Amino acid sequence: MNEAEIQGIQTLLKTLKNIVIIPHKNPDGDAVGSTLALWHYLKNKEHNAVIVAPNDYPNFLKWMPGESEIVKFDSQREQAEALLENANVIFTLDFNDLSRIGDMEHSVAASEATFIMIDHHQQPSDYAKFMYSDTSMSSTCEMVYNFIAFLGDEDSITAEMASCMYTGIMTDTGSFRFKATTSTTHRIIANLIDKGAENAAIHNAIYDTNSLSRLQLMGCALKNLVVLEEYNTVYITISKEELQRYDFKKGDTEGLVNYGLSLKGIKFAAIFIENLQEPYVKMSLRSKGDFSVNEFARAHFNGGGHTNAAGGRSDDSMEDTIAKFTKLLSQYKSALN
Ligand code: 5GP
Ligand code: MN
């Protein structure tokens, strides 16, 4: 953000506002962490701020400070609509297009509020008056840290805010291992620990609270893994019946796709998961190197994301989705070798 934009936001927030903060649908650690950190910041400044999430998120995020006050659009629709109607300022965090908030899209698009986007996804849409969009950033949480620093308020970061931002940076960087993890990311992480983020406890709360059924679902998914050697690609499938057999809970399949990418020599990994409620297949895509799963998801599966991590969906059956995916790979043979 440039000086003029920072001043514009400072002027906007000088008087107390009704603020709604929105993460993407099926919020992950970065989406929940960044919205909560910003929420604490704005509330500490006496604004009337609320987070409205499109829907629920996994239990392993439910220890986060302030989490219980998040309003969910799908189950608390009346309250959510009223908040959106009264909002003067809407922050949209960790997504690049209003289609990423599902059924909330229409109510949000209809709002007269001033929009502020903070996001690190590619190809951001042009709906916000103030756009802090940077695809080189590890996470939206790292950007919220910068945003608070831009406004001259780094000293106002509390232990609660630090825990939220630590969580999102940790989850979006695969615990500080992905390419977007810079020395600046590590400096920010160090500052967050100094400000009270309990790093070991956070890792434990996110990664070491599995249920036995989740571990068994992971075992089933790994058994279903298929290697397409010719394309340095693997895919994993999970059917509806398998989700039910292992008592699927939201978040249980998170991160599974990365196991595919951990195989030696593999450049492209996909997971296909049948939706329990509706007849479609949700997919997560991951890559190493230059092969852009963002482009792949945009071109063929109505999705998007980042170069090395993206998602999409298919309205075909699992069988047809796999057939389409496998057939498409022949177009990318040289990119994958
Ligand atoms: P995940 O596979 O972990 O759900 O998502 C990986 C990345 O792709 C995240 O940054 C997520 O926001 C993005 N993403 C996931 N699904 C979709 C989708 O259907 N459409 C778009 N545009 N992005 C997605
Ligand atoms: Mn993110």
Image (tube, rainbow, N blue to C red):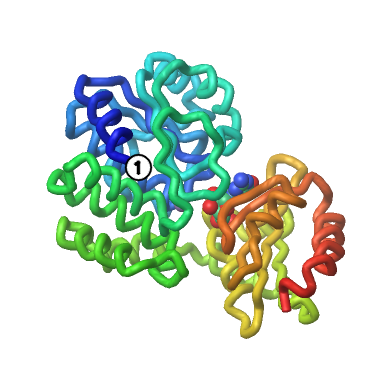
Residue 124 horizontal side relative to residue 278, left or right: left
Residue 264 horizontal side relative to residue 171, left or right: right
In the foreground, 175 or 2: 2
Q: What amino acid does circle 1 point to?
A: Met
Q: Which residue is mark 1?
A: 1
The residue shown at (41%, 19%) is 113
The x and y percentages for residue 18 are 31, 20
The x and y percentages for residue 241 are 73, 56
**Quarter the N terminus occupies:** top left
Examine the image and state in which quarter residue 101 appears: top right
Examine the rendering and report whether any part of residue 263 can be seen.
yes
The x and y percentages for residue 291 are 65, 67
The residue shown at (63%, 73%) is 260
Examine the image and state in which quarter residue 244 appears: bottom right
* Residue 128 position (above or below residue 118): above
In the foreground, 152 or 61: 152
The residue shown at (41%, 54%) is 139
